Image (tube, rainbow, N blue to C red):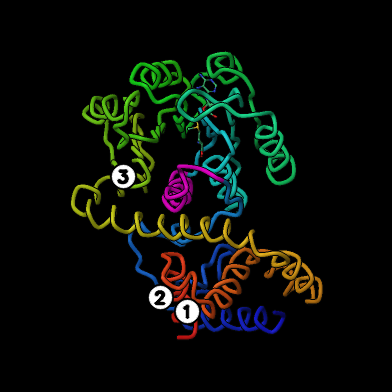
Amino acid sequence: MVAFIREVVAFRAAAQEASHVNEVPPGFNFLEERTVRPSDSWIRDTSYWVPRHLVESAWLEHAPFAFWLVDAIRPTAIAELGTHNGFSYFVFCETIVRLGLPTRTFALDSWQGDDQAGFYGADVYESVSTINETDYSAFSTLLRGYFDDSLDSIPDGSIDLLHIDGRHGYDDVRHDFEAWRPKLTDRGVVIFHDIAEHQEGFGVWQFWAEVAQQYPSFAFDHGHGLGVLAVGGDIPKRLRAFLEEGLLKESEIKKFYESRGAVIAELYDLRVRAAEVPGLKGELEVAGHQLNEKDRVIALQESDHLGLVDQIRRIHESTSWRLTRPLRFLRDAVRRHRG
Ligand SMILES: C[S@@+](CC[C@H](N)C(=O)[O-])C[C@H]1O[C@@H](n2cnc3c(N)ncnc32)[C@H](O)[C@@H]1O
């Protein structure tokens, strides 16, 4: 295992040299990329990052675009309506840490659940709160309660990025948008989850169809749909370029982020499966302690990935999972890794 981690470290160095970049970013995805990546205004290194906190969520497939978006608009403050386990929120927070941005963030939720997301216990808030305290307390605040109860806690004209992901009925989403719209700055951007969800009781698609006519916008169809709406008069430069390119390259952009999102969903899926293998996590921890400090830092950053690659080696030798989808994905990844 230690040898394998060293191999990965060497691979990272080789990839760095091969791609002529000065620095391999912390989220560098050695599973995926060995060559120079395409560079468009809508694809950056951030588009390839892998979330540190992979928790259960219907939002997994939007992480790559969310990393890109926060990088692109560099918001002064972010507010999220509907945080649940914290997946989307921690993706925003992680971008801030990795890029060293001076952004403040607010997560709003009753942390009780609702009839659409399902009701849940106090353990969900406790787990979100622990991650928040450990990793993001310098800039992140959890506002526990109903969204409207926090309206006075956030000044008007102070939020650059608002994520609306509470209840998904037409009236709910319309209310959340209208109540929180005054909080946005001139550079304000709103993202709506579930714009492609048409099951009973879901009306974000309908509200989206209305607002997308009124403001510059882009809509992703994958991962239940994510709508990006530039509501401010002063659209951040890189987002403006994205929206302009979106008119010409809509399907290319959608395909790219859909495929990147699928990688994150696969990783989550495999992580859940890997947790079923006794001792795998412990083995990784022991290996990590045996490394020198530099290697250990890298191993911690990549430990999830390493676990998955190790897992696939084991799975690859077995027959029962051979034809599963995650296996095909990782088999390809290992091939790419071996060049
Ligand atoms: C779909 S989940 C959020 C998912 C999350 N963004 C993610 O990344 O997985 C919706 C959340 O909104 C919360 N919620 C819905 N309506 C609310 C309201 N009016 N006030 C506070 N919380 C609310 C629920 O408790 C639930 O946790």
Which residue is rendered at x = 36% and y = 29% of the image?
A: 232
Q: Which residue is the extreme one toward the left?
A: 248
Q: Is residue 65 magenta?
A: yes
Ranked by sequence position, the earlier of labels 2 and 3 is 2
Ranked by sequence position, the earlier of labels 1 and 3 is 1
The residue carrying pointer 2 sits among few (fewer than 14), some (14 to 19) or many (20 or more) residues within 10 Å by Cα, namely: few
Q: Looking at the picture, tell me which residue is in the foreground, 202 or 187.
A: 202
Instruction: Kindly report which numbered mark, 1 or 2, lies closer to the viewer in this rendering.
Output: 2
- Find residue 64 and report its horizontal and vertical position in percent: 44, 53
Report the Cα–Cα distance between label 2 and label 3. 26 Å
Determine the main secondary structure of the stretch shown in magenta.
helix
- Reading the image, the residue beneath label 2 is 36
Q: At numbered mark 3, what does the secondary structure look like: helix, strand or loop? A: strand
- Reading the image, the residue beneath label 1 is 20
Range shown magenta = 56-73
Query: Which quarter of the figure has residue 262?
Result: bottom left
- Reading the image, the residue beneath label 3 is 220
Report the Cα–Cα distance between label 1 and label 3. 32 Å
Task: Determine contact: label 1, label 2, CB under 8 Å.
Answer: yes
Query: Which quarter of the figure has residue 325?
Result: bottom left
Q: At numbered mark 1, what does the secondary structure look like: helix, strand or loop? A: loop
- Find residue 266 and report its horizontal and vertical position in percent: 46, 59
- Find residue 31 and report its horizontal and vertical position in percent: 50, 72
Q: At numbered mark 2, what does the secondary structure look like: helix, strand or loop? A: loop
| Image side of residue 232 versus residue 271, left or right | left
Task: Determine contact: label 1, label 3, CB under 8 Å.
Answer: no
Name the kind of residue labelled 3 in the image.
Phe
Q: Looking at the picture, tell me which residue is in the foreground, 42 or 260.
A: 260
Ranked by sequence position, the earlier of labels 1 and 2 is 1
